Amino acid sequence: MTLQWRKLFSNRILDRGRDYWKKDWVYAPSYSELPAGIHCRVGKPGQSYDVTIDFSDDWSEIKWMDCDCPYAAEGYNCKHEAACLYATELFVEGMQAIQEPLTSELPANDRKKRQEEIIEKVYGLGRKYANYIFDPGKILASVDFDPVLWERIWDNPALAHLVAVNLDDSQANDKQPLLTATGFSHFANRGNGNKVNVKVGLKQVSELKCNIAECKQDEITGPCRHEIALLQKLVLMIMRENPGEVTDYQADRALARAEMLEEFDQDALEDVKLLAQLEKEPGGSFLVKFKVGQKRLYVVKNIQNFVDDVLSWRPISLGKEEVLVSPDSFDPASQRLFSFLATIAADGADIYGESKRSIEIASGRIDGFFAAVEGSEVENLDNKQVVPAKRGELEKAELEIDVYGGRGISITGICPPVLRGIRASYQLTDEAFVAGKLGNMLYALFGNKENIDVSFDINQLSQFKATVLPLLKKYSNLTISPAAQQFLEEAGGLEKSQLRLDVEGDEVVGQARVFYQGKAVRLGASGERAIKRDWYKEEKLADLLEKFFDLEDGDCRLDKGDDEAVYQLLEGMPKLLAAFDEVEVTPAFKKLKLKDGLNLTFGLSLSDGLLRLDLKSELTPEELAEVFSQYKDRKKYIRLKNGSFLNPASQDLEKLALLAKNLDLTAKDFGKEQLEMPAYRALYVDQLLKEQEMGEIERDDHFQQLLVDFDQKEAPLKLPTGLEKILRPYQKTGTAWMNRLAQHGFGGILADEMGLGKTLQVISLLASQKDQPSLIVAPASLVLNWEAEFKKFAPEMKTLVLSGSKKERSGQLADLTDIDVVITSYDLLKRDIANYEPHTFAYEVIDEAQMIKNPRTAAAKAVSVVKAKHRFALTGTPIENRLSELWSIFNFVMPGFLKSYREFKKDFESPIVKEDDQDCLNRLSQMVGPFILRRLKKDVLKDLPDKLEEVRYVGMGKEQRKLYDAEIARLKNKVMAEDDEGIKREQIEILAALTRIREICCDPGLLYEDYKGESEKRLACVDLIKSAIDGGHKVLLFSQFTSMLDLLEESLKAEEIGFLRIDGQTPKAKRLTLVNVFNHKDSPAKVFLISLKAGGTGLNLTGADTVIHYDPWWNVAAQNQATDRAHRIGQEKKVTVYKLIAKDTVEEAILDLQEAKSQLAQGILTAESVSSASLQKEDLLKILD
């Protein structure tokens, strides 16, 4: 490159740019030919910037240069651009070298001899390469390359720079080891074919091919220049990295260090002192150097090397001696300083000069530097004295005020420079390095100047006395000469200011007067030459008045009809009262009022299933509606009909806005005499009014009774005698809670944790009120369980379980005389829905309500069509994955309670999940709180045995890991090629790929029929089962893959272990029989294999006390439900839950995801933080890493 580009940069920027280039901090340079240019990223890892430079076609002139770093944004040429030019310079040199002829005329014998010499030269760099997996000497000997071309490229780094290399060593440990290297030309406009490839085995090159467009392959015999450049880089990589060697980087370093320490044979020094040497720089910063040693200290000549040597336990030079200094070698004070220095050294750009012996400490680092040296000593290089580093008072400026030319005053003196940090200001003196308070305002007045020499004219003395003089007295040692003192005293002074305000006709008027020597003078009026006026103060008062009035010689006028101007005056009255010594207002002016409140009162009443809200204020409803409309339109002021003004920032208006937002009210609604809304809003509205302190609340008797009922959480409910004795206290509370909701016309969600007896609480509710049939809808697998529970706990109740053909079920529904409870499944309800039209049930209760979490399903629509006076939903997991599930359940329980789903998504789901809006989360929690009852076993079942959970990690065999890594790589490449929208489009394929990966984690035999290897997880699982059985335990084993249960069956049969199984093929009627057999104490079946979907809910399996989750599922709620088949009422033993996780796989990521999803449900039930539950590209990549 003939361009003399270095003159564009300062020496310091060039040094930094060269450092960045040498550290390989120029990333992915992309060169283009026409137009000539480069684009790359430059900077330290994690903090890089885009650099673009355009050149003339012959690369001899810079046309345009840009970097997006802050320094370049200020118009300066930066270190990133310099680093880019260093890289470009090497590239262009290679470009020029390539233009020269690359052919040679060597005879065959000479060619072979020169090849052998080159191989010996390369190979002879270290005979240890003979033991490498891939032999570089033999690899080179397998290629007939041009020796002349080889040496030209070998000796010219610029030529080699033309090819960037990617090395693939994923097959280096295969049965037939293989290395693949791909070289890319740096030109950006050559397309995907612009590359050169090489494949090598242990001792020879198996493939070498160049597809680079500008390559002149026909000019030489054998490999072209790109192929040779790639081959050279590959050989150097082999010699440097030894691909296929299992000794990792850390082990290699350990070996090298051990060899070095063995040769050195000396312990590290102790009580080493590190001393900082400070030199003041222009502008207040410090240039810092260092000395190190014990009794005698030696200059640190290269800070970067010093830090690296200490951290790496390499010897350092102290004078003529080589000694070991480790991070522990320093005395306590020096350890703090070395730690700071190591942080600085990590950013080598802060170390200056070719020798790298000094660093600059400016405002950004001074706080940290002082913390490192505080309490110890530093050396002041200005006077060569070692001084303490301490906190104290900064030296004050020594200033003097004197008369200046008879027309003013001057300030002269010395102001010691300081360096301002974030926490303190710092000063280096002859006696100490001091950290003092930040608040010295002299530096704001004069800058960081050491020599002060400023003057003020007589016309500015008033302002000087009011503003500057107090600061000088506070922050300096100030001397005022007698002449200057007299001059300042004679400058005069304003004794008092006065303002009178009145209304005259259509104008607001005022008179502003100032007093000197007892005499009133019009504010700002000329004349009165005999009086020395304080023009500065008068101008400040006049400036303030002119914000509100037309002002002339102290007389103020304002058009009373200008509403905005009058409002601004009333709003600005506090400022006028503060500025003037005396303010007088007439009765006429007092009639202009600015109100801050409306005296709000709220009336709440209940009747006919409606909540009525009466809103009263000082305004009529019509005027209140108009006022609120102006507030919503962000009017600058609001004028009322009586002529007074209302502050738009009034707290009452803000309260009305909050009420409108939470209750979906408009300005038009506030114009009504009374607002009506569904009664289920009553508790929420009352809580909202109280919490926000909106005003006085008046409640009618019905509303008061509602509050009393909901406050009495233990309110008694008359129950049949048999149930009264059976129910636990918390179950009585749950039954009474449902009854209380029903009495007030509400529905609810009983969301007790699995195993707390939700079924029994519903039976108790229905048994206490048998005036009309009720309907139970449950999953098919639980229908018979419901019938059995009714027979067990309320045998007097007549139940009807719908079964048989469609015609038979129609006949059963035709006559419900004497029937107390109808029990059906979701599936049958969908088929029979027309037959429910004539009936109105007392209660409709849906069990496992997560079955309707998708509101568009036929099941969700069917349960909502059935007519019932009261509706309740039972679920241990009201939210499994996303908030829409909660909306769907409430849409059944109380239609309209959470508005339409479109409104719910806009008002709640999106703000909570996507924006983590805590206010919105709290509002939703307050709304649904009264209608969800959730208790946890740990809170209400003090006598329930503990549940112990343990994650057991298992490894993978070599073959299993190989299959896993291949699937991960395929999916990861696909995900990286898509954006978030693409991920949504391809979600089915991506989920299928994730399922394949999870199957490999379980057992590769699930995916590959011909797989002959072992599954570490299956082996570990069988060992765990055998250990549990030997300890007298029974085991429940859950998996999502029925094919995995098939494989486990084979293993259990081989071990002669008795087992039972439930999956989707098990008839519903048979499931209860299998449960009873397993729970029997003498059952030969010690293991129950269960598919998560088929048997994860509704079953009572307290005969087991050990639960194994063979594979994790995204939905932790489903796993917890499965666990609660054993950990529930009736369990007498501790339950141990094992989660089997394949180490270093997606299964570990699934555990993290489970935690995120459990937070979603917990957040709504407790108003805690909620994060996003839906996967984006970033989430998928985290799972796959």
Image (cartoon, helix red, strand yellow):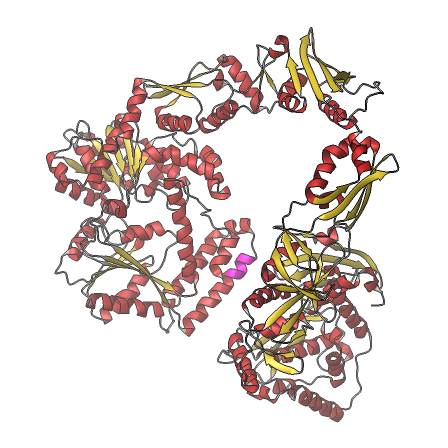
Give x and y (percent) for residue 1178.
52, 54
Residue placed most toward the observer, 1041 or 1101 = 1101
Can residue 471 be seen in the rendering of this structure? Answer: yes
Quick check: 114 above or below 616?
Answer: below
**Predominant SS along the magenta part:** helix
| Residue 808, visible in the rendered structure | no
**Residue 975 is inside the magenta segment:** yes
Task: Give the left or right position of residue 800, taking residue 848 as reference.
Answer: left
Q: Residue at x 68, y 55 (%)?
A: 427
Q: Nearer the viewer, residue 479 or 818?
A: 479
What segment is highlighted magenta in the picture? 972-977
**Picture quarter containing residue 1048?**
bottom left
Front one among 304 and 821? 304
| Residue 1128 in picture, x, y percent from top left | 22, 50
Q: Determine whether 1108 is above or below 137 in the image.
A: above
In the picture, measured across the screen, residue 586 lies left or right of residue 712, that is right
Work out whether 516 lies above or below 964: above
- The one nearer the camera, 45 or 594, is 594
Tell whether 363 sits left or right of 682. Answer: right
Seen at 72% across and 35% down, the residue is 467
